[in-house]
Image (tube, rainbow, N blue to C red):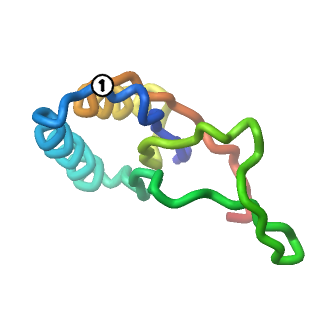
Amino acid sequence: MTTYLISFPSSAMQVTLDELQEVADAAHAVIQEMKDAGVYVFGGGLNEAVTPVLVGADGSVSDGTYPETAQLDGGFTVIEAASRDEAVRWAAKTAGACRCAQELREFQYDPLV
């Protein structure tokens, strides 16, 4: 099994407040379907109200992020799928539920994990 990240930035989800509950219900239904199929690992949305920090190897904490990830926000799901085609199918279901395109990324294989 290969592990995949399905994600989207907050700005991609263009829904009204009136539609938000319907979108949440649809997304939760896809997550339940993933769980029932045994592919769901974990997922959620990044808490955009909490400012990210950088933590050094010595435990020091500094405000901010790497410049490349300053706009990292939104939601994500991690799945384990038998093939990229299967992962694409789950990403498409997520896109339908969330009403926005999803990024699909493959985690590198690590034989020690």
Q: Residue furthest right?
A: 58
Q: Quadrant of the C terminus?
A: bottom right
Total residue callouts: 1
Left or right side of 54 for 78: left
SS for dot 1: loop
- Residue at x 27%, y 49% (from the top left corner): 31
Left or right side of 107 for 5: left
Q: Is residue 74 above or below residue 62?
A: above
- Residue at x 76%, y 45% (from the top left corner): 66
Which is more toward the observer, 108 or 43?
A: 43
Which is more toward the observer, 45 or 86?
A: 45
- The residue labelled by disc 1 is 14
Which is more toward the observer, 50 or 23?
A: 50
Quarter location, residue 68: top right
List x then y, in percent, for residue 72: 58, 41
List x then y, in percent, for residue 64: 71, 53
Q: Is residue 88 above or below residue 25?
A: above
Left or right side of 86 for 57: right
List x then y, in percent, for residue 24: 20, 44
| Kind of residue sitting beneath label 1 | Gln
Label 1, residues with CA under 10 Å away: few <14, some 14-19, many ≥20: few
